[in-house]
Amino acid sequence: MKKNQIILLTVGILAVVLLYLLPTSVVDNNDNDLLQFVDESKPGGEVIDHSSEIPEEIQPKIDFWKEKLASSSDLKKDEVALDSLMVIFQNINQYDSAAYYAESFAKEFETITLWQKAGDAYFEAFTFALEPKKVERLGNKAREMYNKVLEQTPDNLDVKNNLAMTYIASSSPMQGITMLREILEVDSRNEKALLNMGRLSMQSNQFDKAVERFEALVSYHPNSLDGNYLLAVCYFETGSNEKAKAQFQKVKNMDSDPAVQTAVSEYLKRIN
């Protein structure tokens, strides 16, 4: 669990997709750029200049890896360059830009690994998006990439989990819930599916059901920070203060990060 997400939960924001940053598409307005970013939400996918959003000291690094990645109008098969460029964009919260390059690379070289990398990148961008239209667009892109993976590896449960969560945030949430249930039928101990089902129960204020999911999760995966923390929250929400206190103390001992410590301390204060 990202530390910022724990802080959000502390103040009562419980959502299926835990959000805290709004990534934006990035483009360079240089005509010599080999790859440009496209705003797919606009008719025709016009290129938009957001280059000013890139920190000045970061731009040379982006230019370096873009040159490594492409020559003339063709992409080089250089996954190190792709990964390096993606990490830079992700570090400055430009998640959809990282996804755009991953998709371009996957389309060029068409391997399952690359399609999943593109799907994961779009899923991350989807996770951090706040604007409904952007959530929809990025969710659609993630599904497009993931479906290419599932065509060849239909038993990839990690991909199915993420795919399910994109449906949860769409106009077809039951399709996502059905997928999560199907995963648990195949693998009752699946960490991601248990976590996601627990979060869904929390979102709908069904904390008793959430407790069941998270208790199962931590019994199978005792080192899951997410599962242990959310179980503590659910104990608190159901009025099981002694269990909540013990569970929060367990989380406090699991991770020394200041954000985790602060979140736990706030709950312990409320219990005491």
Image (cartoon, grey):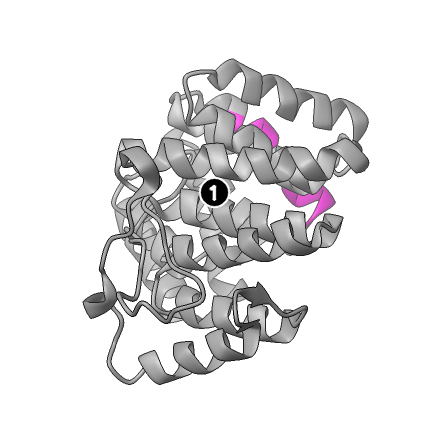
The magenta segment is 210-221
Q: Quadrant of residue 216?
A: top right
Labels in figure, total: 1
**Residue at the image point whose x is 26% and y is 37% from the top:** 131
Amino acid at dot 1:
Leu
Residue 266 locus on image (x, y percent): 28, 54
**Disc 1 crowd, CA 10 A, few/some/many (<14, 14-19, 20+):** many
Query: Is residue 170 visible in this depiction of the protein?
Result: yes
Residue nearest the observer in this picture, 114 or 9: 114
**Residue at the image point whose x is 34% and y is 68% from the top:** 92
Residue 82 locus on image (x, y percent): 57, 68
**Residue at the image point whose x is 74% and y is 48% from the top:** 112
Residue nearest the observer in this picture, 245 or 261: 261
**Residue at the image point whose x is 36% and y is 60% from the top:** 94
Principal secondary structure, stretch drawn in magenta: helix
Residue nearest the observer in this picture, 270 or 251: 251
- In the rendered view, tell whether residue 237 sits above or below residue 261: above
Confirm whether the magenta stretch covers residue 43: no
Confirm whether the magenta stretch covers residue 213: yes
Residue nearest the observer in this picture, 210 or 110: 110
- In the rendered view, tell whether residue 90 sits above or below residue 172: below
Query: Where does label 1 land, which residue?
Result: 230
Residue 62 locus on image (x, y percent): 41, 76
Find numbered disc 1 in the image and state the secondary structure of the residue it sits on: helix
For this view, does 57 lie left or right of residue 244? left
- In the rendered view, tell whether residue 262 sits above or below residue 15: below
For this view, does 69 lie left or right of residue 147? left
- In the rendered view, tell whether residue 196 sits above or below residue 219: above
Residue 225 locus on image (x, y percent): 54, 54
